[in-house]
Amino acid sequence: MSFQHTKLFGGAIVADLPTEFGDVSDIRQVPDTQEVYLDANGFTSIIFDILQRVEHAASDEAALKVHFQDIVDGSGDATKFYEVKQTTLGKMPSTPAHTLLAIQTPTPPTPAPGSLSTIAPPSRNPQPDFTAILLTLVRLVEQKTDIVIAINVPHAAGEYAIGSVDLENGKAGVMLETAAMVREKVLASLEVKDWGLFVN
């Protein structure tokens, strides 16, 4: 996988992203506080979100989970956390940063009264069996800002080998291993170039 130095938010932030990921704003409107990149060869996405700092969490890890819940709120999916830890930004080593890995599993559909089947009709965007979310929180204390970076990795039937992902037994599977490599590359290269971006 190759990476390219990418300007985000008009160049105020930079990071290395996979060359095969395209800027979603080229095809649809994206909020000014977000940058969204989508894998041209799959369903994985990377979202950079500039948010108001979570002030009253007991810890940075707790703040990270607050942002996670805001992202998944209303989905109805079951959540399982596998990793919550402190990390380091290669270009901004003194800036607090934390990551988590979670799996979101959709709730099976409830059959309608009198229905004999719960099988949904086929769609162009198949319902994933589960979605892995690699979330990173970057805490800009003086700017009262949280940067949240989400790498979303839907695992739909036919897109991955069934049984290849078993996190309880240390098996991440190809798609999740690739996403983790992308996350490490982003963490090593992320840098704020223009702090004026955060002026209220």
Image: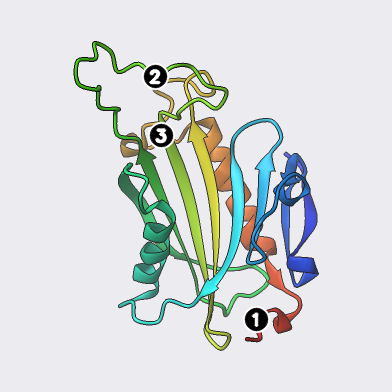
Q: Pointer 3: what residue?
A: 130
Q: Which residue occupies 71% across, 35% down? A: 40
Q: Is residue 124 above or below residue 74?
A: above
Q: Check the image and name the residue furthest to the left.
A: 114
Q: Which mark is residue 120?
A: 2
For mark 1, give the secondary structure: helix
Q: Is residue 9 above or below residue 18?
A: below
| Residue 38 picture quarter | top right
Tell me the quarter of the image containing the C terminus: bottom right
Please name the amino acid that badge 3 sits on: Phe
Horizontally, residue 97 falls left or right of residue 191, namely left
Number of the front mark, 1 or 2:
2
- Label 3 or label 1, whichever comes before in sequence order: 3
Please name the amino acid that badge 1 sits on: Phe
Q: Position of residue 107 (x, y in %)?
A: 29, 34
Instruction: Determine crowd level at label 2: few under 14, some 14-19, many 20+ residues with C-alpha closer than 10 A.
Output: few
Please name the amino acid that badge 2 sits on: Ala
For mark 2, give the secondary structure: loop
Number of the front mark, 3 or 2:
2
Q: Disc 3 versus disc 2: distance between alpha carbons?
A: 16 Å
Tell me the quarter of the image containing the N terminus: top right
Q: Which mark is residue 40?
A: none
Q: Pointer 1: what residue?
A: 198
- Label 1 or label 2, whichever comes before in sequence order: 2
| Residue 125 picture quarter | top right
Q: Is residue 99 above or below residue 123?
A: below
Q: Which residue occupies 65% across, 52% down? A: 36
